[in-house]
Image (tube, rainbow, N blue to C red):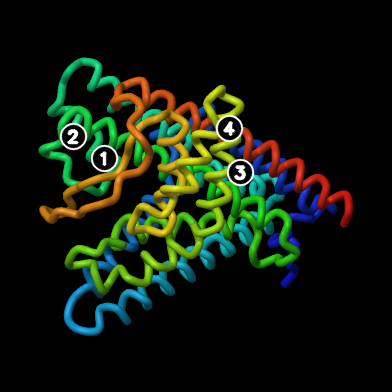
Amino acid sequence: MSLNFLQGVPFGLGGGYWLLLITLGVILDWLIGDPAFLFHPIILIGKAIGFLNKVMNKGSHRRSKGFALLIIVVLMTALVVLGLQYLTFKINFFLYSLLNLYLITMALASKTLAQEVMKVLKVLKKGDLEQSRIQVGYLVGRDTQQLTETEIIRATIETTAENTIDGVLAPIFYLFIGALLPVPWLNPVVLVMVYKAVNTLDSMVGYIQEPYREFGFASAKFDDVINFVPARLGSLLMLLAGFFLGYSMKEGLAVFLRDRLNHKSPNSAHPESVVAGLLGIELGGTNHYFGQVLEKPTIGVAKSPLNLLDIRETVGIMYASEIVTMVLGIAVGVVILILT
């Protein structure tokens, strides 16, 4: 069987083909996001995880079963993507490219994240605290039923900062890695969809509370591993984006260096500390998950109290960091392609 469909080089385009598709995917995500009329592949992955969770998350040896879940979901995702790429390539190169563009666009979440975050802002502006709690509950894993307005703002900023990495910069990172790696089985679409599958696993079962403590262990740890580099590199790019937006890069860097480890997750505090430093606010602190109190260190210095404008500014940092990442990624990609 020819490996051409894995490399995307039927016309000798190679990495240039993928750089073009990645750029088009980012633009499409900005324009249309995740429209309701398009089926989202993550929904299918989520349903598969939900089914496997019901079947496997019971009885003894739950940690081993959790490792099996991770392997099953990763292999299933990679094989389905490769199978679809092969079938569409055999039918028509345009159809193959359309599939790749569709999956790249669906793997990115900047517009959808911005839309969902702005929904919280909209109801907060109306003073509807109850609806604000419901709306922010769609974005965060913590209990939201008793949150104050300030806590809702904090939760919204924190999830926007975290998802700037998970939903935007990390997928782009893996897309570029796939475009430039000389490994045909690890093309950009395979890499980014596996990343999204692991990210979905973590969001569904990667909790320290029961019934996920043992079963979700492998998924949570592997998500930490694959986000290790994107969280750190992406946070530096967020700092650079903040500089271009007119924020104090010095303040952002100072808080980042001091507070980037102030979280139980090895990665989450990195982007949160950047946002806290750039905006001069304090994040972190006590949250409730599944009725249990979880104490977290604070991040940043409260030079000003949290307010609604901070939500909009965090979204701006997200978009600016995506642009910075794309410009640098394309520049590095072009240089590598020229040299090789």
Q: Distance between the residues labelled 4 and 1?
A: 27 Å
Badge 1 or badge 3: first in the primary sequence? 3
Badge 4 or badge 1: first in the primary sequence? 1
- Mark 2 or mark 3, which is nearer to you? 2
> Residue 267, position in %: x, y?
44, 55
Instruction: Locate the C terminus by quadrant.
Output: bottom right
Numbered badge on residue 134: 2
- Mark 4 or mark 3, which is nearer to you? 4
- Residue at the right extreme, as displayed: 339
> Residue 106, position in %: x, y?
50, 43
Are the two marked residues, 2 and 1, in contact with CB atoms closer than 8 angstroms? Answer: yes
230 left or right of 130 in image: right
Tell me the residue that label 4 is attached to.
Answer: 241
Answer whether residue 177 is visible to the viewer in this image.
yes
- Mark 2 or mark 4, which is nearer to you? 4
User: Which amino acid is tagged 4?
Assistant: Ala
Instruction: Locate the N terminus by quadrant.
Output: bottom right
Numbered badge on residue 138: 1
Badge 4 or badge 3: first in the primary sequence? 3
Badge 2 or badge 3: first in the primary sequence? 3
Badge 2 or badge 4: first in the primary sequence? 2
Q: How far apart are marks 2 and 4 (CA)?
A: 31 Å
Answer whether residue 103 is visible to the viewer in this image.
no
User: Which amino acid is tagged 1?
Assistant: Tyr
Q: Quadrant of residue 159?
A: top left
> Residue 109, position in %: x, y?
46, 39
- Mark 1 or mark 3, which is nearer to you? 1
Residue for point 22% across, 73% down: 57
User: Which amino acid is tagged 2?
Assistant: Ile
